[in-house]
Image (spheres, rainbow, N blue to C red):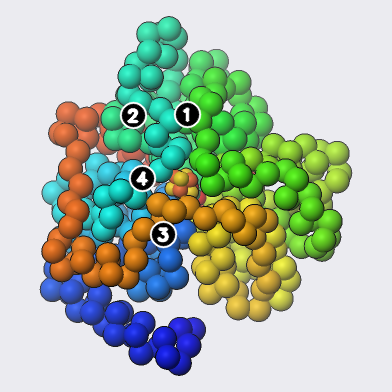
Amino acid sequence: MHGNGATSSYERFAEEVHRLAGERRAVVLAHNYELPWIQDVADHVGDSLALSRIAARSDAEVIVFCGVHFMAETAKILSPDKTVLLPVLEAGCSLAETVTAEDVRAYRAEHPGAFVVSYVNTSAAVKAESDLCCTSANAVEVVASLPEDAEILFLPDFFLGEHVARESGRHLDLWMGECHVHAAIEPRSLVEKVKANPKATLFIHPECGCTSTALHLLDRGELPAERTRVLSTGAMVEAARELGGGSALVATETGILHQLERANPEGHFTAVNPGAVCRYMKMTTPERLLQALTDLVHPIEVEEGIRRRAERAVQAMIAIGSPSAAGE
Ligand code: 13P
Ligand code: SF4
């Protein structure tokens, strides 16, 4: 998989990671959007929900989170006694940046009694102000768990919120946030790719700018119902295994293609937008991972008062829903 010349350098890198991880009693987690070498060397690769669950039950002393800041923070919220390392502190998230704790407090002041459901792509401070957290894998189930007549603010992703409202049949107040990478996966690219590959299955992450259009086209019978699937990244990997030698158009960050190809080497996977690359996820290079394990950098801390309040919402998130379905 790593080619001849590269094999030895990848293997040297992997050996060093495993040696250091053993010394540090560390577990290495990687999100599905990370660079291929990081995915391949990690002990566990997965979507936000799967990685949160693994972090919560791990007995390692150190969790090295190859992902972005809110993910490492979530691991720290769940495991305050462990050292949680984020190899690159600048690895942030444009979506998480769209809402602050103050925004949530202001909403609550205007809507007393409303429930606030926060997508996991938020800061610990926002989670602390929320009733429940969710990921793309269990957002529909989380909303469906609330009382029928509840007033609900869903934040911060507008596209995911629209999808959840549709699937759960609930009215949701939607925060107008978006991820710059997924928002750029537009309806036009999806329609063009479908025309060029009419037999392909569609894997659509619900954060995408094309999600509502796809569902609209589905309603009008212009997309194949049996082959159009709105999925978390983890659920895409499971769906890839069932594809055999077929092909899929993939609407999400392109790092996922590596996991899909690993899960099903016979399948053909094409990005709907090949430019959909999250620069934050690519900041964790092999060098930065080695540095993190060598120097134990960068430990993530969450102030205890915030952590405790955030933990309630996050524990509810990891308890609700199937391991990886995204509202199917
Ligand atoms: P999932 O891994 O939960 O599908 O989320 C994708 C994402 O955008 C994470 O930043
Ligand atoms: Fe955030 Fe978007 Fe990157 Fe995911 S892909 S980490 S939502 S900026």
> For the residue carrying disc 4, how many other residues have a C-alpha within 10 Å: few (<14), some (14-19), or many (20+)?
many
The quarter holding residue 165 reads top right
Q: Does the CB distance between marks 2 and 1 fall below 8 Å?
A: yes
Residue receiving disc 1: 155
Look at the image and tell me whether residue 254 can be seen.
Answer: yes
> For the residue carrying disc 2, how many other residues have a C-alpha within 10 Å: few (<14), some (14-19), or many (20+)?
many
In the image, what residue type sits under mark 3? Lys
* Foreground tag (1 vs 4): 4
In the image, what residue type sits under mark 1? Leu
Residue at image location 19% in from the left, 79% down from the top: 19
Residue at image location 40% in from the left, 27% down from the top: 99
Q: Is residue 253 above or below residue 174?
A: below
* Foreground tag (2 vs 3): 3
Left or right: 284 in relation to 201: left
Label 1 to label 3: alpha-carbon separation: 25 Å
Label 4 to label 2: alpha-carbon separation: 15 Å
Residue receiving disc 4: 92
Residue receiving disc 3: 282
Left or right: 47 in relation to 28: right
